[in-house]
């Protein structure tokens, strides 16, 4: 075979091979969809279910809700806020049990009656990441408490009472229920801070989260004790109830008031002179940090568990608000609330 003939044959074979390859490629591309390998779909990301359960439906929790909303925007998660309508342990237990049954990954709660609810809390802790805020249940299997050291908060309020009554006098204490851990610890702090200053607690009245009773308790106490010098409110709504009763009875300036928290009625009472001081917590932080820790514990597992405080407590601290700083405090509060919208 000549060289020219060989070259011709080689070129012919190579051209035929290329044509055959192209034809196979076309055929492969034209396979019916049923013969093509199925596309592998990525599994949908699990929706993390988180809930924040308060101890009552007070306006106080609006500030905490703003903290929750801020974290929701940052982390792209949702936190359901639940409020027991009557503020009873039974109401709260029902909400907690329902959430657990619905497979919630994280639950944060302010416990109404810590000693009475241990069995329920421990059962829930078996199926979800359980933390507490505002009112702790230290004997339960909760993972973390976020909030005020209530004993120290009570002492701070007691020190303000001593300043207001330098010569001592009779005082009365008002609260929803003393069974709650936060109430009992605050009262103990008040008692310890005032015991060596001729200050006498003449009565302690519970209202069981009944707003009308909260006010009538104050009116009854002022009418029963002509020499009553000061009213103490341990829960957030007690401040506005005390201010209303004092104003209605014409006792402003004659009966003083030292309370907890920053409800609008309390801050207005300070501006009007019917309340002299309030020890405020940081409910915005209750909401923000509860949402953050629930989310991390539910999604990061052991690494988040390893970051928990060794004593299981995250103290958010307190601040005293009186007439000298109430305007600045209200401004700061408005800015925090706005940031959660």
Image: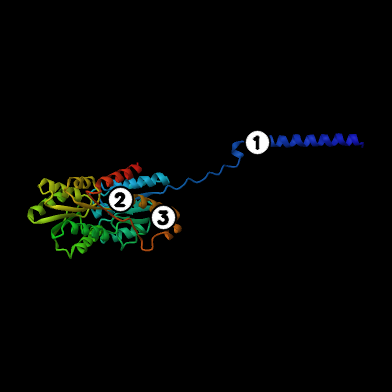
Q: Secondary structure at mark 1?
A: helix
Image coordinates of residue 25 in percent, x first then y, are: 69, 36
> Is the N terminus in the top left, top right, bottom left or bottom right quadrant?
top right
Q: Which residue is mark 3?
A: 297
* Label drawn at residue 283: 2
Q: State the residue at coordinates (39%, 45%).
A: 72
Colouring convention used in this rendered image of the protein: rainbow
Q: State the residue at coordinates (16%, 59%).
A: 166
Alpha carbons under labels 1 and 2: distance apart: 63 Å
| 232 left or right, relative to 305 | left
* Label drawn at residue 29: 1
> Is the C terminus in the top left, top right, bottom left or bottom right quadrant?
top left
Alpha carbons under labels 3 and 1: distance apart: 49 Å
State which quadrant residue 159 falls in: bottom left
Number of residues whose C-alpha sits closer than 10 Å to that of mark 1, classed few (under 14), some (14–19) or many (20 or more): few
Dot 2 or dot 3, earlier in sequence:
2
Number of residues whose C-alpha sits closer than 10 Å to that of mark 2, classed few (under 14), some (14–19) or many (20 or more): many
* Label drawn at residue 223: none
């Amino acid at each position: 075979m000549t060289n020219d003939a060989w070259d011709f044959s080689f070129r012919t074979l190579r051209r035929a091979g290329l044509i055959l390859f192209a034809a196979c490629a076309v055929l492969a591309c034209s396979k019916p969809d049923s013969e093509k390998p199925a596309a592998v779909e990525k599994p949908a990301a699990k929706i993390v279910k988180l809930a924040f359960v308060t101890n009552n439906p007070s306006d106080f929790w609006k500030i905490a809700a703003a903290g929750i909303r801020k974290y929701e925007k940052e982390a792209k998660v949702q936190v359901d806020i639940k409020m027991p309508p009557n503020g009873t342990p039974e109401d709260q237990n029902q909400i907690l049990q329902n959430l657990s049954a619905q497979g919630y990954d994280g639950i944060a709660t302010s416990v109404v009656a810590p000693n009475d609810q241990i069995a329920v809390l421990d059962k829930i802790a078996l199926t979800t990441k359980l933390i507490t805020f505002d009112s702790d249940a230290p004997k339960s299997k909760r993972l973390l408490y976020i909030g005020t050291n209530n004993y120290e908060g009570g002492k701070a309020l007691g020190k303000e009472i001593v300043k207001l009554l330098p010569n001592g006098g009779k005082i009365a204490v008002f609260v929803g229920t003393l069974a709650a851990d936060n109430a009992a610890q605050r009262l103990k702090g008040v008692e310890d801070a005032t015991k060596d200053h001729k200050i006498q607690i003449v009565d302690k009245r519970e209202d069981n989260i009944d707003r009308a009773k909260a006010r009538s308790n104050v009116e009854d106490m002022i009418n029963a004790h002509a020499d009553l010098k000061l009213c103490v409110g341990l829960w957030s709504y007690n401040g506005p109830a005390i201010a209303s009763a004092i104003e209605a009875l014409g006792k402003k300036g004659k009966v003083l008031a030292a309370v907890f928290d920053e409800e609008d009625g309390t801050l207005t009472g300070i501006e009007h002179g019917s309340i002299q001081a309030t020890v405020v917590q940081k409910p915005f932080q209750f909401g923000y940090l509860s949402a953050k820790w629930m989310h991390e514990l539910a999604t990061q597992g052991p690494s988040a568990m390893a970051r928990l405080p060794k004593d299981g407590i995250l103290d958010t601290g307190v601040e005293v608000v009186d007439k000298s700083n109430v305007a600045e405090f209200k401004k700061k509060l408005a800015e925090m609330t706005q940031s959660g919208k």
